[in-house]
Amino acid sequence: MATARHDHWIDGRTHPPRGGARLPTLDPTTRAPGDEIAAGTAPDVADAVEAARRAWRDWADRSPAERGAVLHRIAEAVEADAPELSRLERACTGKTEAQLRLEIGMSAEYFRYYAGVVRAAGQGRVIEQGAGSHTYTRYEPYGVVGVITPWNLPLNQACRALAPALAMGNAVVVKPSEFTSTSTLRLARLATEAGLPDGVLNVVTGTGPQAGEALAAHPHVRRLAFTGSVATGRYLAGVAGGRLIPLTLELGGKSPLLIFADADLERASAAAVTALAANSGQVCSATARVLIEESVHDEVVDRIVTAAEKLRPGVDYGPLITEAQYDKVLGFLAGAGTPATGGGPLPGPGLYVRPTVYARVDPASRLAREEIFGPVLVTTAFTGEAQALRLADDTEYGLTAAVWTGDLTRGLRLAERIEAGQVSVNGGPLTVETPFGGYRRSGHGREKGLTALHEYAQLKTVSVGLR
Ligand code: ADP
């Protein structure tokens, strides 16, 4: 199929790149070239921020019910447009149908959730100080919010930040990953058609250094939300620190999945296989470090390996999304010894890596400590709860953890101790309603849930003397 060209989306319309340059994209299932996107630079970012600056006040002046009504229409538009959004997302990520359904469903869900939540929780409260005054708080938007998203869950992660930011009355400029921009561009068009005023949602595409840095540095951007690598997060934290603006950082993880001998081993092993296959492990919250009680370690590894060997490329798992990530994952595997299964690329042109399991990995090794971001699990055996906890927390990260045990008291004891932003016990679900974010170098600030609404607002106190 002929490739298309995608311009920025600024002020409710397409906007060709001022510098005139384009960037290629790649279909990771074949390595064939895909659509071209605009190579945005600082002047494009300035146009987008200016449009957002003009637009946010009128948007913020609408009632929460009115803003919510627009967000509901965006949710409906995303659902109705799922075939085209899937086509665009698939073209540059190679995601499986099941994964796309999940992500596009969640994308719509964020708008629906915050459309309602802002009406119930977008307001401040009255503070009683006795007779003689009337004092109250208000949640007010920041104005222009900059959102920088990665390539692993492109549309989903844009919507996760956009929905609460827009609900709260902000205008947003999004800089999606240069590898996966087209679904976010489509979303902005759908939002405009659904009645979002021009300038309230703008998308500038391009590379991190050319477009992302300009966005983070722009003096009218009053808040940032970033999802991506630790290195870029550290850089942006420096920029935000220098400018004294808040930012949410959702970075990586090396999350543990603990399996005790008394757990439902079938379900626990299936959870490990899901962590391996879902988006081919390219999920920051993937529980890729499987800690298994010694007495059942080998049995659980057998179960995981048997299931992993049945996973079908293109159906149960997709390719690595970028060439750089493919090379990085293969680099991890090259020096890592003999796996229990997998351990290399699939033959053919696509960026597929075999689902891989390394058993009884030394917790001090690179494989056990660094985020691989591919279809790779490592297992380590433990004896007793104290050692399980020590191993679970033996990481610089702290994004998620999963505990599987037949002893719920132990499950809760561990959930309260493990240093991670979210812990699920026996498959407890993490949904749009559940706050999401990291401890330690996994980042700070929270996405999702009621909490995220308030992350995109600043609290003002108004006090009136009545005497
Ligand atoms: P990865 O290494 O997984 O690609 P990155 O952190 O580099 O993750 O990318 C996540 C997002 O951050 C992308 O949209 C990317 O373009 C952007 N980005 C990368 N470097 C910078 C930077 N220096 N300033 C702003 N944004 C950046």
Image (spheres, grey):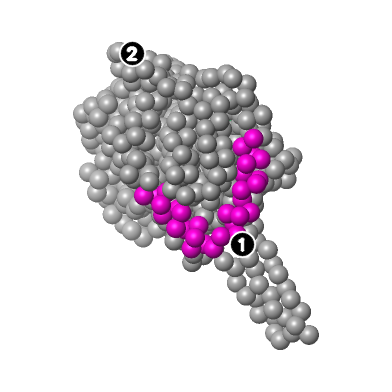
Residue at (78%, 85%) from the top-left corner? 467
**Which residue of the protein is positioned furthest toward the right in this rendering?**
467
Return the mark for residue 348. none
Which part of the image, by quadrant, shows the N terminus?
top left
Residue at (58%, 43%) from the top-left corner? 199
Task: State left or right for residue 451 relative to residue 401.
Answer: right
Tell me the element at label 2.
loop
Q: Is mark 2 within 8 Å of ligand 1?
A: no
Residue 249 in sight here: no
Look at the numbered discs 1 and 2 and tell me whether their residues touch, using CB distance below 8 Å: no
Nearer the camera: disc 1 or disc 2: 1
- Label 1 belongs to which residue? 139
- Label 2 belongs to which residue? 349
Tell me the element at label 1.
strand
Q: Where is residue 70 shown, x and y percent of the image? A: 46, 54
Residue 30 placement: quadrant: top left
What type of secondary structure mainly makes up the magenta span?
A: helix
Which residue type carries mark 2? Pro
Magenta extent: 47-76
